[in-house]
């Protein structure tokens, strides 16, 4: 009986071994894939900017001053620049060149076109030259011709110009609000 139980057990185990084997099947399939889509490209760029012009006044022999500025709002950008000539710098350069050429009276006369220099020379007792006269003769000539003394230039702004400046200021503020 032991033999019979062993044979049955062996038979059951061998049957289980055959049942565990996989079944392999070859298959071939053909398929077609169609894709429909759309692409959206978003470009993110920095906001527009008003860039003021570059004005170079690095040459020390020039008597110019560069001024530039820019204003940018969300919609509108404005930039501008200009160059101003400084008159006193030109006067100093001209006086130096005249002095270097040996024309000392002409150099002093050039400097005396400035009202501050003219007053300083008179206060020092060395009046500015007048039509080639120097010293006491020049002092007497200046005393008789006071209208020819250099005067400080005053810039007067009339009411109409002030109104235009005010309107321009209000308009520029409105532009900034855009």
Image (cartoon, rainbow, N blue to C red):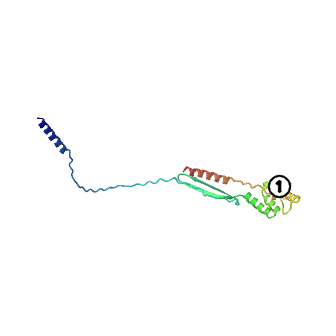
Work out which residue is located at the far front of the displayed protein and give it.
3
Task: Locate residue 168, reporting x and y percent.
Answer: 61, 53
Residue 156 picture quarter: bottom right
Q: Which residue is mark 1?
A: 121
Residue in front for this viewpoint, 176 or 84: 84
Residue 127 picture quarter: bottom right
How packed mark 1 is, by other alpha carbons closer than 10 Å (few <14, some 14-19, many 20 or more), is some
Task: Locate residue 82, reporting x and y percent.
Answer: 64, 58
State the residue at coordinates (79%, 55%): 117
Task: Locate residue 116, reporting x and y percent.
Answer: 78, 54
Query: Quarter holding the N terminus?
Result: top left
Work out which residue is located at the far top of the displayed protein and give it.
1
Q: How many marks?
A: 1
Q: Label 1, secondary structure: give it.
A: helix
Residue 57 picture quarter: bottom right
Work out which residue is located at the far bottom of the displayed protein and give it.
101
Work out which residue is located at the far right of the displayed protein and give it.
136
Q: Is residue 28 left or right of residue 125?
A: left
Residue in front for this viewpoint, 170 or 149: 149
Q: Is residue 90 above or below residue 21?
A: below
């Amino acid at each position: 009986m032991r033999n019979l139980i062993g044979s049955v057990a062996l038979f059951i185990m061998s049957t289980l071994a055959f049942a565990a084997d996989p079944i392999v099947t070859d298959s071939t399939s053909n398929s077609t894939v169609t894709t429909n889509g759309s692409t959206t490209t978003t470009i993110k760029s920095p906001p527009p900017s008003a860039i003021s012009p570059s004005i170079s006044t690095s040459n020390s022999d020039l008597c110019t001053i560069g001024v530039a500025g820019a204003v940018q709002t969300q919609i509108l950008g404005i930039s501008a620049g200009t160059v101003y000539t400084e008159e006193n710098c030109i006067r100093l350069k001209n006086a130096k060149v005249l002095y270097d050429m040996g024309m000392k009276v002409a150099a002093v006369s050039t400097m005396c076109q400035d009202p501050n220099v003219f007053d300083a020379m008179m206060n020092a007792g060395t009046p500015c030259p007048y039509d080639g006269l120097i010293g006491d003769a020049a002092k007497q000539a200046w005393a008789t011709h006071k209208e020819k003394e250099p005067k400080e230039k005053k810039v007067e702004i009339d009411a109409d110009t002030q109104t235009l400046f005010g309107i321009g200021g209000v308009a520029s503020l409105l532009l900034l609000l855009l």
